[in-house]
Amino acid sequence: MAKLLAMILAGGEGRRLDPLTRDRAKPAVPFGGRYRILDFVLSNFANSGVLKMKVLVQYKSESMNTHIQRAWRLSQILDQYVEIVPAQMRVGRKWFEGSADAVYQNLNIITDEEPDYTFVFGADHIYRMDVRQMLDFHQDRKADLTVAAIPVPAAEASDFGIIEVDAEGRMIGFVEKPKGPPRTMPGDPTRCLASMGNYLFTTDALVQEIVRDAGDAQSAHDFGKSIITGMFPRRRVFVYDFTRNDVPGQTERERGYWRDVGNLDAYYQCNMDLVDVDPVFSLYNDRWPIFTIQHNYPPAKFVFNNERENRVGRAVDSLVSEGCIISGGSVTSCILGPKVRVNSYASVEGSILFENVNIGRHSRIRHCIIDKHVDIPPGTSIGFDVDEDKRRFHVTQSGIVVIPKGMRLEHEVEPIE
């Protein structure tokens, strides 16, 4: 049986998710109420039986380090692990200078483990994937590198690495984030084939290419711009069609679901996908679960049923995490993280509330993302007056109001008893 190692690149700053990334790295941002973005890639490897994972971290990694240490403890007796690898300055007094440099600075991990094949995956995306099917594809073609890819609208090509393939699936062209008109897919002028940022290397080829790149002073030391661009004309580089990946328990509608939550509006919409009556991406697939930390919190509670005074604790079309209390308030089309409290006569609509958010009485909250440990004073209205919201908070292009972690809001109206 082949020896496998997964290296997860989780060191990005995630500037376009600010203010959610002011105190944490992008992969550590909460998602779907009780998960972190990082949990999705780790769950894919765990469910696929690839149980040796190294997570390369760098910027604002404390929150992610804590989450991994508490949530991802595998069996040491079976030599299974999810281990954090901080920037160690092993080759000089410098941080990682690109995704390829991050692997180069940690080549000792690969040489110590001696895997036959090495997965190099990003940690920023929401999807399910059986990575062993990608391994089978890679082995069948005796590839040096296999790149997972998915069709994207041509209008979005500038956000991705765009690939050209021949009839056998071998890469014959690659442009990282093209500025001009992109090369579209044969027979489909509306779509391009985009790299997902998920790579599988035959380990010898990876080591050779990473070392070669490190010696090139003109290189960007990036997997897309440098490694793939340099490899495909010289080596056997193939492209794996992610839409053919078959995950147990997955519906046909979900096949090929992959979302890059690179900005706040995309992050918001991807969360809202989860609360549909029949979501395209379902968290309820018990044959391919998404693993995360298990809190010792009590069940969610809904109290007060006074229709006459409109004091009813209810939540509809929503995900409500453990420890929440809906105390006479109304929640519609929302995602509530652990220990959220919505007090009497308050209404929350189309919003994402992180852990330990408190919504005061008579407040009205609409189309918001509220980070952890925020106390919304009684009688507060957010999401109804754009000019007022922009004066106090960050507002996205689509009008989503984002309130950063721990922000203190002043009482602007007297609470109504």
Image (tube, grey):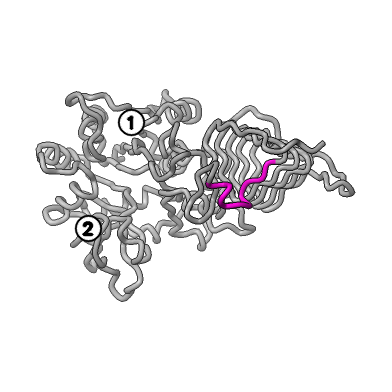
| Frontmost residue, 383 versus 213 | 383
Looking at the picture, how far across and down is residue 381, in whole percent? 66, 45
- Residue 371's spot in the image, x, y percent? 55, 37
Q: Quadrant of the N terminus?
A: top left
First of labels 2, 1 by sequence position: 1
CA distance for labels 2 and 1: 27 Å
Q: Callout 1: helix, strand or loop? A: loop
Type of residue at label 2?
Answer: Val
Is 139 colored magenta in this rendering?
no
**Is 167 situated above or below 378?**
below
Q: From what the image shows, is residue 164 above or below residue 202?
A: below
The residue stretch that appears in magenta: 380-390
- Name the amino acid type tagged 1: Gln
Mark 2 falls on what kind of element?
A: strand
In percent of the image, x 31 and y 59: which residue is there? Answer: 194
Using a 10 Å C-alpha cutoff, classify the residue at mark 1 as few (fewer than 14 neighbours), some (14 to 19) or many (20 or more). many
Name the quarter where the C terminus is drawn: top right
Judged left or right of residue 248, residue 104 is left
Q: What residue is drawn where x is 42% and y is 24%?
A: 76
Q: Which residue is mark 2?
A: 175
* Along the line of sight, the residue nearer the viewer: 140 or 102: 102
x, y percent for residue 193: 31, 62
Q: Is residue 388 magenta?
A: yes
Quadrant housing residue 238: bottom left
Q: Which mark is residue 58?
A: 1
Q: Give the residue at the far bottom of this rendering.
A: 187
